[in-house]
Structure formats: structure tokens, C-alpha cells
Amino acid sequence: MQKLLISVVGVALGLATPDVVAAQDWTGAYGGVTLGYTTGNAKHSFDNGAPSGNASPEGVLLGGFLGYGMQSGTMIYGIEGDIEVNDASGTFVDTTGSTSAGTTTGKVQGSIRGVFGVAGQLGGKPARYYATAGWAVGKFDFLGGPSVAGTNPYSETLNGWTAGIGMDVKVQANTSLRVEYRYTDFGEASGSLTPTLPAVTMPVKIDQHAIRVGVRLDF
């Protein structure tokens, strides 16, 4: 899945030479669905001095988006929101000195973003090339402890930011194909390792790289 998505993005970006002469109006409401692949960092640390480690969660994202855009000349601006199921998961085990372990698992995530772009063409078809940035939220489950990361769970919903680039290419009058890359910094979670280590806190800093492909429908 990861290699397929990277190949699609590579081909699309290789062809992406905007032609602002043949711009199409992208004003109005729209929505769609996306399938993505994510890799990231989940940096676990422990306030009792146990070795830290990176769980490196990776997995599939599946979700949908809604937005509204306005166009002035070839410039496009608007707002967009999305929500996704996140099945990315990763585990680390550090056996040097005092053994430590941790697991981070994604549950659900979303964002509300500004979108700024330009109307053009790709392969003779109308295209929208855009940059996007805004607020991001994500819910994650964590495990941690002195050995195998299968105990002491806690969950937390994090707030952070996201930014990226992408393009929509018209394949029919109201239907476009989408390719997008986005980086998200969810910030830091912090919970105690109950029930066996209630006095120990395990902060986890999470960031994410994601490639998405999808279909957009104009309403």
C-alpha cells in the first residue's frame, strides 16, 4: 500500500505543470473520500528516568472531507475539514540498562484547514494546485512499562497543527481525483502508567507524515 501511494504521488507530481491559461471555476461546496498511508514518530519518555524510545507508528488512514472554495481569477481560497479512522500503530522496546517499552496506536483524527491555491491544468484536464494548513486533532491509545508494552494503558485526545500540499484533477464535470501530502504535529500526550506504575508518567510526542489519494465531488 505504501509503495503504491508513493508511486501515484510521484507520477502525478512529475506531470504537475500548472497552465493558468486554461483555468476552470472551482467556486462552491464539495466533499469526498480519501485513502492514505501514514508514517510518523511517537517519542515515549518516562519521568522516572527509564530509557526513552520512538514507537514509529505506521498504517492506513480512511476518511472523508468537506469544503467550500472561492475563486478570483486563477487564485482559489477556502476552508476544508476532514475526519479519518487511523489504524497506525508502533512499538519500541529498549533493553539497555533499565528496560522500557511503549506502544502508540491511532484511533481517529481530523482537521479544519484553510486552503489556498491556483487553477490550472494537468494533462489537458482542469486542475487545482493547493497548499493547506490549520488545526488538527487526534485520539490515541498508549501502552508503556518496564518490559513488553502490553500493560498500563491510557488514552488521550491531542490538539496540534497540520500543513501540506496537494492537487485535484477533473476527470468529469463534477468529479476530481485528489493526491495530497500532509505533515501533522499532534503535540504531546501525558498519562500515568496505571495500574502497576501509577507514580510513573509517560509523555509521548506525536507527529505524522501522510500521503492521501481520493475522489472529490462538487455539489
Image: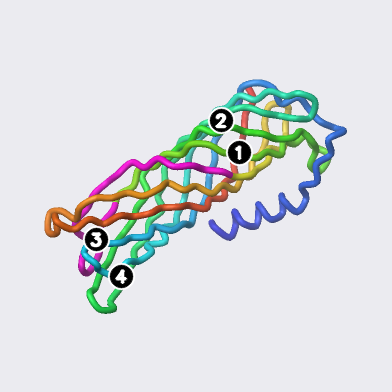
Work out whether mark 4 precedes mark 1 in sequence or the reverse, and give the earlier one. 4
Q: Residues at badges 1 and 3 in contact (C-beta under 8 Å)?
A: no
Report x, y in % for residue 152: 19, 56
Badge nearest the viewer, 1 or 2: 1
Q: Residue at x 78, y 28 (%)?
A: 24
Badge nearest the viewer, 4 or 1: 1
Q: Is 88 rendered above or below residue 164? A: below
Q: Residues at badges 1 and 2 in contact (C-beta under 8 Å)?
A: yes
The label shown at residue 47 is 3
Whole-angstrom CA distance, mark 4 to mark 1, is 36 Å
Report x, y in % for residue 191: 24, 50
Work out whether mark 3 precedes mark 4 in sequence or the reverse, and give the earlier one. 3
Q: Determine if residue 104 is in view.
A: yes
Type of secondary structure dominating the magenta stretch: strand
Under mark 4, the amino acid is Val
Q: Which residue is mark 4?
A: 93
Q: Nearer the viewer, residue 79 or 200?
A: 200
Work out whether mark 3 precedes mark 2 in sequence or the reverse, and give the earlier one. 3
Q: Which residue is mark 1?
A: 132
